[in-house]
Image: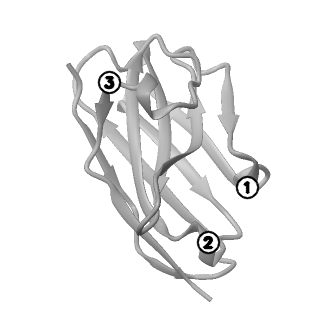
């Protein structure tokens, strides 16, 4: 089992950058594929980005391609989401998720473990 704790969310201005982090417990982090999802008020939880357990595969939703970058540091048991050129429509609670040996999966149902979320608010 793995526990996930997100951090880094805050209020920013449109055009700003922000880096989210998701710290995982346990000694087998390198075996977990990781994903970032977001949920805006009144909407479903949507896929944002994912990275495979080996780190060689990444996926992004179209709306963030070229602006967001997912990465992982297995030595720190942490996955990051670098968000640049933020827009008001990026406002949401951001969640990280994990599944053992996942390959940058896109669906929330593909993941077994979830963090509590971190709020990102982009003011225009």
Q: What residue is drawn where x is 45% and y is 23%?
A: 110
- Classify mark 1: helix, strand or loop: helix
For disc 1, the neighbor class at 10 Å (few under 14, some 14 to 19, many from 20) is few
- Classify residue 61 as left or right of residue 36: right
Q: Position of residue 63 (x, y in %)?
A: 73, 55
Task: Say which of 4 and 47 sits in front.
Answer: 47
* Residue 80 numbered mark, or none: none
Q: Is residue 35 left or right of residue 76?
A: right
The residue under label 1 is: 63
Looking at the image, which residue is at 25% across and 50% down? Answer: 116
- Residue 19 or 113: which is nearer the viewer? 113
Circles 1 and 3, Cβ within 8 Å, touching? The answer is no
Name the side, left or right, on which 116 lies relative to 97.
left
Task: Please provide percent x and percent y for residue 71.
Answer: 57, 37
Q: CA distance from mark 1 to mark 3?
A: 25 Å
Q: Is residue 100 above or below residue 73?
A: above
- Secondary structure beneath dot 2 equals helix
Q: Earlier in the sequence, mark 2 or mark 1?
A: 1
Q: Secondary structure at mark 3?
A: loop
Q: Residue at 57% across / 17% down in the picture?
A: 103
Rendered position, 45 above or below 3: below
Q: Position of residue 58 (x, y in %)?
A: 67, 29
Q: Quadrant of the C terminus?
A: bottom right
Is there a contact, CB below 8 Å, between mark 2 and mark 3? no
**Are there few (<14), some (14-19), or many (20+) residues within 10 Å of tag 3?**
few
**Residue pointed to by mark 2:** 89
Query: Which is more N-terminal, label 3 or label 1?
Result: 1
Residue found at x 33% / y 50%: 6
Mark 2 surroundings within 10 Å by alpha-carbon count, few (fewer than 14), some (14 through 19), many (20 or more): few
Pointers 2 and 1 in contact (CB under 8 A)? yes
> Which residue is identified by label 3?
112
């Amino acid at each position: 089992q793995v526990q996930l704790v997100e951090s880094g969310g805050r209020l920013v201005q449109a055009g700003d950058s922000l880096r989210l982090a998701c710290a995982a417990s346990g000694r087998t982090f390198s075996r977990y594929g990781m994903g970032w999802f977001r949920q805006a008020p009144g909407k479903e939880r949507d896929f944002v980005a994912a990275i495979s357990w080996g780190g060689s595969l990444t996926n992004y939703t179209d709306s963030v391609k070229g602006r967001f970058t997912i990465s992982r540091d297995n030595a720190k048991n942490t996955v990051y989401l670098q968000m640049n050129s933020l827009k008001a429509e990026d406002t949401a609670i951001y969640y990280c998720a994990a599944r053992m040996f996942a390959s940058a999966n896109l669906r929330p149902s593909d993941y077994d473990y979830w963090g509590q979320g971190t709020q990102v608010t982009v003011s225009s």
